[in-house]
Image (cartoon, helix red, strand yellow):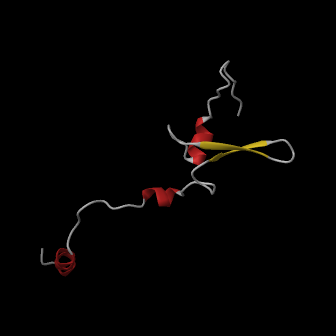
């Protein structure tokens, strides 16, 4: 992937890279220089890999059925 540096020294991070790292507007990034001279871009707030697709789906869907209501459904009482 290739991108062009603007006169202000800015570049656009390709969408595939943003998606891979979970970079959204406001995300801080870190540039690390390796001994061989290459530069690596990482998220500053998460040094590890981004959340998996399953971790991103975790959460609470809101108020659900009570245990009693679920049991009544499984017994065919509802």
For the image shown, how many numbered marks are present on the structure? Answer: 0
Quadrant location of the C terminus?
bottom left
- Quick one: 71 or 15, which is closer to the camera? 15
Q: Whole-percent x and y of residue 4?
A: 69, 24
Q: Is residue 31 above or below residue 72?
A: above
Q: Quadrant of residue 74?
A: bottom left
Q: Whole-percent x and y of residue 69?
A: 17, 74
Q: Quadrant of residue 5?
A: top right
Q: Is residue 25 above or below residue 47?
A: above
Give me the residue at 47% from left, 56% from top.
56
- Quick one: 67 or 29, which is closer to the camera? 29
Q: Would you say 10 lies left or right of 39 here?
A: left
Quadrant location of the N terminus?
top right
Give me the residue at 33% from left, 62% from top.
60
- Quick one: 27 or 51, which is closer to the camera? 27
Q: Would you say 62 lies left or right of 3 here?
A: left
Q: Would you say 6 lies left or right of 74 here?
A: right
- Quick one: 58 or 71, which is closer to the camera? 58
Give me the residue at 84% from left, 41% from top.
37
Q: Would you say 76 lies left or right of 22 here?
A: left
């Amino acid at each position: 992937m290739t991108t062009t540096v603007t006169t202000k020294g800015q570049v656009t991070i390709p969408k595939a890279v943003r998606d891979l790292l979970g970079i959204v507007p406001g995300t801080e990034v870190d540039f690390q220089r390796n001994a061989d001279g290459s530069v690596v871009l990482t998220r500053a707030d998460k040094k590890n890999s981004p959340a998996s697709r399953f971790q991103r789906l975790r959460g609470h869907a809101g108020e659900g059925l009570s245990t009693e209501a679920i049991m009544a459904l499984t017994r065919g009482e509802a």
